């Protein structure tokens, strides 16, 4: 092939084809979520796993991180071969023990690797913090699942034989339909976005792999052993991350974020981020884990378990305080309130909530400066009040279809040229969806969120495992109103995947549900499901 042919081929790949590719890969992700036939789902998984990296390569082909590939193609081929061999080995292990994908994914959730991307801003090429270990687990799990499906393995144990017969199954189906609808709309609305490359990367880095992850988790047989293992891995990681935060605070050093190190140097207080790039992300992770663990204190578990849980909560609470993440503290309170309301009568839960709010109000009154409340609402929220009003203004300009997927940052800067660059990122997901996708995307998003909450909460009273998952999911939804990243956070998909799996009838029966039915003590219910 001569040089002119190469130029033509590259022009095609960087022209309308990537936009069509985003729509196609979004449709494949939707098929992964909705397909009932195992082989059809396997084909969708395979297509998504192949097309998504190709789209990414077209986007970053001329970016700095691929210069080494251009200069040393042989070494790049060898490296790719080694990666594929490692992936095949991991897939073979998971194929023999499919349940391993669950603890492996949970273990990989927090770890991000800074990678330069093809997207550019006024300051140059951007750096994305990618979940590379999680992508590896998802790819390996998907290959193992595809292999089993092609060989004609039996149907999924997490799905009923006749979907839609029970109310729970019908609701699960609608949750998945609405999620698939939102993903497809996101791909379609990337066509007219002024920042198409951001929409493409969101699809490739988040929506596609996380849709595959959710499908894999729904297919896991969630017995007590797997649940306890996943919880144990999560708690161990959270405690380890907290101690890293203690080290940062004691030595007044920040491990990963140079931006946070500069900010700490400008203030009298010191904020920690552990292995996370952002204190709010660290705080969100700790809040979710605390909610999952705290359920042990309100059910009749053995005393030794409750003592151990109390010690863990003390460590995680100290780590959360050092993040100074007000959004994470608020999410924790919301999650604990949901836990209480699912365990006790609403009246008792209300008393607990009022007591907690009163204690928080006293703390704020004693030292408002610590919480930034002496700066007004916009200052206390680090400028997020302005982002909300600016986002709503963008929405009123294009109320039906919005400015296009992934375009919030660039459109916000265009309409607010005097705004600091650090404040141009979104911090309120519903407002962002309205600005980028208009009523079309907003209605789909809200319908999905509401149906997902109803599904994970439905019939959870007296069930410690499902109550903890429901409370953590609702807390995460609340956190997205104050920070960012809902469907861009793999924790959302993990909690939803496990929650949907446990909401289906066969899994509840196999686990014993743990529901404290009349005449069944809380201790017996907790024993049936494990801590």
Image (cartoon, rainbow, N blue to C red):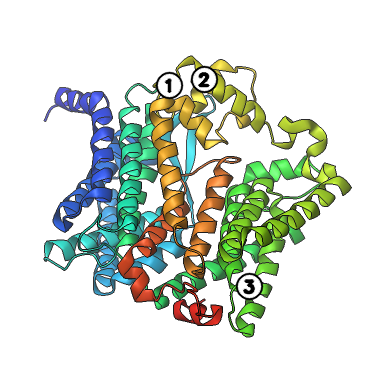
Along the polypeptide, which appears first: circle 2 or circle 3? 3
Q: Position of residue 501 (x, y in %)?
A: 35, 62
Distance of label 2 from label 3 (alpha carbons): 45 Å
Q: Position of residue 530 (x, y in %)?
A: 48, 78
Q: Residue at x 40, y 57 (%)?
A: 134
Q: Are marks 2 and 3 in contact (CB under 8 Å)?
A: no
Q: Are marks 1 and 3 in contact (CB under 8 Å)?
A: no
Q: Can the viewer see residue 250 in this picture? A: yes
In the picture, measured across the screen, residue 30 lies left or right of residue 502, that is: left
Q: Which residue is mark 2?
A: 394
Tag 2: Cα neighbours inside 10 Å, few (<14), some, or many (≥20)? many
Comparing 108 with 402, the one in front is: 402
Distance of label 2 from label 1 (alpha carbons): 8 Å
Q: Which residue is mark 1?
A: 403
Q: How many marks?
A: 3
Q: Position of residue 78 (x, y in %)?
A: 26, 55
């Amino acid at each position: 092939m001569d040089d002119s042919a190469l130029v033509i081929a590259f022009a095609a790949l960087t022209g309308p084809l990537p936009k069509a590719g985003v729509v196609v890969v979004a449709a494949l992700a939707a098929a992964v979520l909705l397909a009932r036939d195992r082989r059809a789902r396997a084909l969708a998984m395979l297509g998504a796993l192949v097309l998504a990296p190709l789209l990414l390569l077209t986007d970053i082909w001329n970016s700095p991180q691929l210069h080494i590939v251009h200069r040393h193609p042989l070494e790049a081929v060898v490296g790719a071969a080694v990666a594929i061999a490692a992936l095949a080995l991991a897939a073979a292990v998971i194929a023999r023990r499919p349940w391993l994908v669950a603890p492996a994914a949970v273990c990989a959730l927090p770890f991000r690797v800074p990678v330069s991307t093809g997207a550019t801003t006024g300051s140059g090429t951007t750096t994305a913090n990618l979940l590379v270990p999680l992508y590896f687990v998802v790819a390996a799990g998907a290959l193992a699942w595809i292999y089993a499906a092609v060989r004609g393995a039996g149907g999924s144990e997490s799905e009923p034989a006749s979907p839609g017969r029970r109310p729970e199954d019908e609701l699960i189906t609608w949750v998945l339909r609405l999620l698939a609808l939102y993903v497809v709309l996101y791909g379609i609305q990337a066509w007219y976005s002024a920042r198409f490359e951001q929409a493409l990367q969101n699809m490739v880095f988040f929506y596609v792999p996380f849709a595959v992850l959710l499908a894999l988790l729904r297919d896991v047989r969630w017995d007590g052993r797997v649940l306890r293992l996943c919880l144990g891995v999560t708690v161990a990681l959270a405690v380890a991350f907290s101690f890293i935060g203690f080290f940062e605070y004691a030595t007044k050093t920040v491990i990963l974020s140079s931006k946070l190190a500069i900010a700490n140097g400008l203030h009298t207080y010191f904020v920690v981020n552990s292995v996370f790039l952002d204190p709010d992300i660290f705080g969100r992770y700790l809040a979710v884990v605390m909610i999952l663990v705290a359920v042990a204190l309100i059910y009749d578990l053995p005393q030794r378990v409750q003592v151990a849980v109390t010690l863990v909560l003390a460590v995680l609470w100290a780590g959360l305080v050092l993040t100074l993440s007000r959004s994470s503290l608020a999410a924790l309170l919301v999650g604990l309130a949901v836990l209480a309301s699912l365990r006790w009568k609403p009246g008792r839960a209300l008393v607990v909530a009022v007591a907690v709010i009163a204690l928080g109000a006293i703390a704020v009154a004693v030292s408002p400066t610590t919480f930034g409340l002496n700066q007004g609402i916009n200052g206390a929220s680090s400028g997020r009040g302005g982002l909300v009003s600016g986002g709503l203004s963008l929405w009123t300009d294009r109320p039906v279809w919005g400015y296009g997927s992934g375009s919030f940052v660039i459109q916000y800067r265009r309409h607010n040229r005097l705004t600091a660059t650090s404040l141009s990122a979104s911090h309120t997901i519903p407002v962002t969806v309205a600005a980028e996708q208009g009523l079309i995307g907003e209605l789909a998003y809200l319908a999905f969120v509401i149906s997902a909450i109803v599904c994970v909460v439905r019939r959870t009273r007296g069930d410690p495992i499902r109550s903890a998952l429901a409370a953590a999911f609702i807390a995460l939804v609340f956190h997205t109103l104050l920070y960012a990243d809902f469907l861009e956070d793999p924790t959302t998909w993990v909690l939803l995947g496990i929650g949907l799996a446990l909401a289906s009838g066969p899994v509840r029966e196999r686990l014993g549900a743990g529901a404290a039915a009349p005449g069944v003590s809380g201790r017996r219910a907790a024993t049936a499901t494990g801590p």
